[in-house]
Each structure stands twice: as C-alpha cells, then as structure tokens.
Image (tube, rainbow, N blue to C red):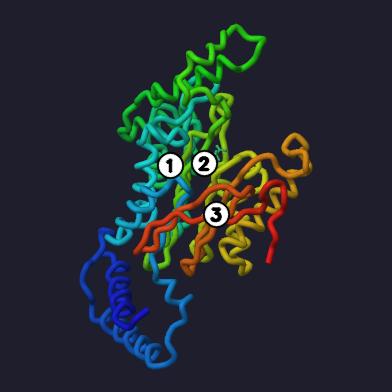
Amino acid sequence: MNFWLLLENSLVNLRETEMDKGGKMKNRLSRRDFLRTGMCLSAASFLTSGKSLSSREMKSSKRLVIASGNGLRATEKAMELLKKGEDPLDAVIAGVNIVEEDPEDMSVGYGGLPNEEGVVELDASVMHGPTHNGGAVASLRNIKTPSQVAKLVMERTDHALLVGEGALKFAKAHGFKEENLLTDKARKKWLRWKETLSAKDYWFPLQKDEVEPELQSVLTYHGTINCLAIDEKSDLAGVTTTSGFDYKIPGRVGDSPIIGAGLYVDNEVGAAGSTGRGEANILNCGSFTVVEFMRRGNSPEEACLQTLKRIASKSKLQTHLLNKDGLPRFNLKFYAINKKGEYGAASMWSDGKFVVHDGQENKSIEIAYLFKNGEERKQN
Ligand code: ASP
C-alpha cells in the first residue's frame, strides 16, 4: 500500500467511525481525529521509510469479489458498488439480485426449477462480517429476491431464519410483491420430468419428436449462486441464494440458507460459501469448516479442498452416495476469501469455473478439484 493510500484510508476510517448523538455519521474531523491522523501519518512514514510492505500486506487493502461460475454479472456489479464505498453485504446482494431476477438462470430466483408439485421454493442466506450478523429464508414462495428478504431478517428481527409461510408474510409486510416465479420454460421442464417419472403413474410420456430438443433431457439440474466480498477496510460479507434441487419434495431445505453450511463469514478470518449437494454440506457444516481451516493457516483453496476431503470421507458411511469406485456420486463446491484478500475455490469433481473480480479484471478461473474421472487428485 502506498503512503497516500494509507493516509486516505486512515482519514476515511476516522470519518466513518464518528457518530453524532442521533446515531448519524459525522463527516468532519475533530482536533482529536487530527492528532490521531497525525499519529497514523508518522506510523505510515515509518513504515514507508523502512522495507516496503510485502505483497500479502498489499492485498489486505485490496477489494475483491468472488462468486460461483454463474456469477460474472454479480461480481461486476458488486465490485462497482464496493468502489463507490458501499457496504460489502449490500454490494454482493445487489450482484446476486441480477441472477435472481434473470429467468434464464434456472437455478436461482425467478425462473428457477420448481419442486415436485411445480412450485418454485427459494432459499437464501446473508452474512455480514463487521457485525457478525446473518439472516436467512427457506422455502420462500412467490418472491423474486430471497437474498433481500434474508437481509431484512438480519436487520429487522431478532431471528436468523424464517421459513415458508412465515417468511412470505414477513416479506409482504416489508412491501415485497408476490409474483408467480414459474416461467413457461421451467414449467415445461417440470412437466417433462413428471411425464418421464415412471411406468407406474398415469402420465403419458410424449413421443420424442413431440418434445422440444432442450426439454429432451430430464437429467436433474440444480445450481445456486454464492458471492463473497472483501472491501478496502478488509471487511467481509457473503450471500448464497438458490431455488434448490429441482423437483425436490415440497419443504425441502438445502444448505444455502443454513449459516455454517451454505455460507459462513468470520470477519477476523475469512468468508466461505458453497454450491452443490446441500445435504452433504449440511451434515458437515461445510462453509464453517472452510473458515476454520483458514483460521489454522490454510490458504483459501487448500481450506476448500480439506473440507471436501472430509465430506468425501464421511460420505463413505452412506453407500447410496457412492459410485462404483467408492467415491462420492455428487458434486459440491466451496468458494473462499481470507482476511488478507486471498481467494480460492474447489470442487469435489473436476468441473467448471468460478469467478473473481480483483478490481481491475472480472474473470472466470478453472476451479481446483479433489477427484477427476474417478481418481483422487494428486496433492503436491
Ligand atoms: N446447494 C443447493 C441445494 O442443495 C443446490 C445447488 O447448489 O446445486 O439446495
């Protein structure tokens, strides 16, 4: 960090921490602030006169946003807001709102694939590092942006998680409009799934040539968006939002709204979030575990891999989750940022990318993995 940036940060911090009696931010410097700033200046000149700061220390003042592979627009938006000085939680929520509201993303928010009865049910959680506070909603129907409702649970209640009917009433009380979240495309996919369910029900499957090519596959499809950020003060925040498993049993809640599983933020250590098989994650407190591995000194990528290793080993106790080689049949991914602004992600199976915006460039990066084609990754 250069001298002037350090000075600017110290002035910004002083301004931001001063409150007037009504709880409003004061935007002026008192004499005491000035003296404190002077002390910062001396400290800064001492630091800059000695050996230069290491690259790791430089990273600590660096803004960064990461997200799951579907988060390119989210990281772009979140970084734009971080640069304007917005709170990191507001920044990541505004980022994922783009995906929640996009009918083309069938794994999140509006346009998400429905439960087995054809109803879209959404899960989301948020966590704010500086206040160590969080909020979540699960099985929420008819509201496009569950991440915003989750933030209101955090801010406006003494609770951490609202579900179903209660979550919907809460959202409506705060002015959210009820809307049908089932798009035509999602409805047709759900219908196709029902028609191909089994030979023992009363649904006639359509002939192959009657089905639009994009609906021919009835493979289950799921996804989520996780987005994490660190701002220039090294404050962390995160959000995870999803429509969960397609055709799930109504009321099924995945990992995304479970603090500690789909998302966890410890402002002293780092932030982590996940996408993939929620059940395996819930049973192993995945995101919490990633943060704990970072606390022990593992890099974000290594912390994600260690957590996946543990989950893979615990899954051996559930034989229905194993493939013919005795390895997990499911995928699960973790994304992480530490307090220094270092980041990483890893996947149970080699598959896909994640997204990083470092303030200069917004890019997709190949994700590290534990297994590939049935083999365990060679650790170095
Ligand atoms: N984690 C989500 C859930 O279990 C699904 C996914 O990310 O694919 O609901």
N-terminal of the pair, mark 1 or mark 3, is: 1
Outermost residue on the left side: it is: 28
At mark 3, the secondary structure is loop
Q: Amino acid at mark 2?
A: Pro
Residue at the location (57% across, 30% down)?
220
Viewer-proximal residue, 85 or 24? 85
Q: CA distance from mark 1 to mark 3?
A: 28 Å
Look at the numbered discs 3 and 2 and tell me whether their residues touch, using CB distance below 8 Å: no
On residue 273, which mark appears? none
Tell me which image quadrant ligand 1 sits in: top right
On residue 367, which mark appears? 3
Quadrant in the picture for residue 250:
top right
- Position of the C terminus, as image quadrant, is bottom right
Q: Is residue 42 above or below residue 129?
A: below
- Position of the N terminus, as image quadrant, is bottom left
Look at the numbered discs 1 and 3 and tell me whether their residues touch, using CB distance below 8 Å: no
Give how far across and how far down residue 312 sits, in percent: 71, 48
Q: CA distance from mark 1 to mark 2?
A: 9 Å
Look at the numbered discs 1 and 2 and tell me whether their residues touch, using CB distance below 8 Å: yes
Give how far across and how far down residue 97 sits, in percent: 36, 42
Residue at the location (30% across, 33% down)?
175
Judge depth for marks 1 and 3 and give the one in front.
Answer: 3
Judge depth for marks 3 and 2 and give the one in front.
Answer: 3
Viewer-proximal residue, 367 or 303? 367
Residue on which the image places disc 2: 257
Give how far across and how far down residue 263 sits, in percent: 53, 49
Residue on which the image places disc 1: 150
N-terminal of the pair, mark 1 or mark 2, is: 1
Q: Amino acid at mark 3?
A: Ile
